[in-house]
Image: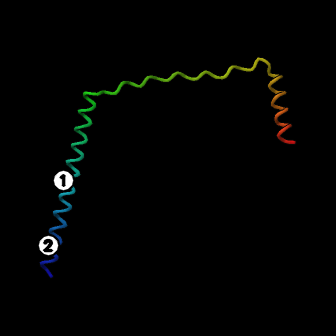
Amino acid sequence: MDNLLSDGLELMVFGMGFVAVFLTVLVFATTGMSAVVGKYFPEEPAQPKAKKKAAPAADNDDELVAVMTAAVHKYRS
C-alpha cells in the first residue's frame, strides 16, 4: 500500500510540475510574440472622431409647442 501511495504522489508532483513549466513557457512565448508583433506592426494612433452636431433649434418654438401639446392630448384621450 505504501508503494502505491508514493507512486501516486510522484505522479502528481510530475504532472503538476509539467503543467507549471508549460504555463510559464506559454506566458513567455505570448509576451515575446506580442513584442515582435508590436515592433513590426505598430498600431496607428486612433484619430479622434468628429463630434456630431446638435440638431438645429426650431425656428418657430410656438409651432413646436403646439405639435407637442397636440401629441400629448391625443395620447391621453
Q: Residue 40: horizontal and vertical position, in percent?
A: 25, 27
Q: How many numbered marks, from 0 up? A: 2
Name the secondary structure under disc 1.
Answer: helix
Question: Extreme bottom residue here?
Answer: 1
Q: Earlier in the sequence, mark 2 or mark 1?
A: 2
Q: Residue at x 21, y 55 (%)?
A: 20
Mark 2 and mark 1: Cα distance apart in space: 21 Å
Answer with left or right where residue 6 lies relative to residue 59: left
Q: Residue 38: horizontal and vertical position, in percent?
A: 28, 31
18 up-or-down from 52: above or below: below
25 up-or-down from 34: above or below: below
Q: Residue 42: horizontal and vertical position, in percent?
A: 30, 27
- Quarter-wise, where is residue 70 in the image? top right
Q: Residue at x 84, y 32 (%)?
A: 69
Name the secondary structure under disc 2.
Answer: helix
Circles 2 and 1, Cβ within 8 Å, touching? The answer is: no
Labelled disc at residue 7: 2
- Quarter-wise, where is residue 14 in the image? bottom left
Q: Residue at x 52, y 21 (%)?
A: 50
- Quarter-wise, where is residue 12 in the image? bottom left
Q: Residue at x 36, y 24 (%)?
A: 44
Alpha-carbon neighbours of circle 1 within 10 Å: few (<14), some, or many (≥20)? few
- Placement of the C terminus among the 4 image quadrants: top right
- Placement of the N terminus among the 4 image quadrants: bottom left
Q: Which residue is mark 1?
A: 21
Q: Residue 30: horizontal and vertical position, in percent?
A: 25, 42
Answer with left or right where residue 74 lies relative to residue 8: right
Question: Extreme right residue here?
Answer: 77
Answer with left or right where residue 47 lies relative to residue 50: left
Answer with left or right where residue 2 lies relative to residue 40: left
31 up-or-down from 67: above or below: below
